[in-house]
Image (cartoon, rainbow, N blue to C red):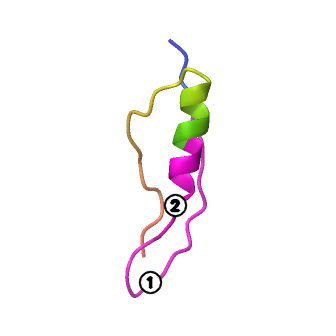
Amino acid sequence: METKFVRINYKNNPATTAETEEHRKIIEEQAANNFSYVGYLPVKMG
């Protein structure tokens, strides 16, 4: 089994929460390469 990690930079707003749509594009691209989405781990808060 091969594992691949892809980092996404979020537009972070301290008053609300991080926002992005970039993850959808990456999931679709990786699915085309036979990878499966299994979850995410946020590494930056606030």
The residue pinned by badge 2 equals 21
Closer to the chain start, of discs 1 and 2, is 1
Q: Amino acid at mark 1?
A: Pro
Above or below — where is 36 with respect to 25? above
Q: Residue shown at 42%/76% (left/top)?
A: 46
Give coordinates of residue 36: x percent, y percent.
46, 27
Which stretch is magenta? 4-26
Cα separation, mark 1 vs mark 2, equals 18 Å
Which percent across, then down, holds residue 11? 56, 73
Query: Total label count?
Result: 2
Vertical comparison of 41 with 16: above or below:
above
Residue holding disc 1:
14
Image spot of residue 4 (x, y percent): 58, 29
Apparent side of residue 45 relative to residue 7 in the rendered image (left or right): left
Q: Report if residue 20 lies within the magenta region.
A: yes
Q: Residues within 10 Å of mark 1 (few under 14, many from 20)?
A: few
Disc 2 is placed on an element classified as: loop
Q: Nearer the viewer, residue 1 or 20?
A: 20
Q: Is residue 4 visible?
A: no
Inspect this view and state whether residue 42 appears. yes
Residue at 59 percent of width and 54 percent of height: 8
Is 15 magenta? The answer is yes
* Amino acid, disc 2: Glu
**Residue 1 disc label:** none
Q: Nearer the viewer, residue 2 or 28?
A: 28
Q: Quadrant of residue 37?
A: top left
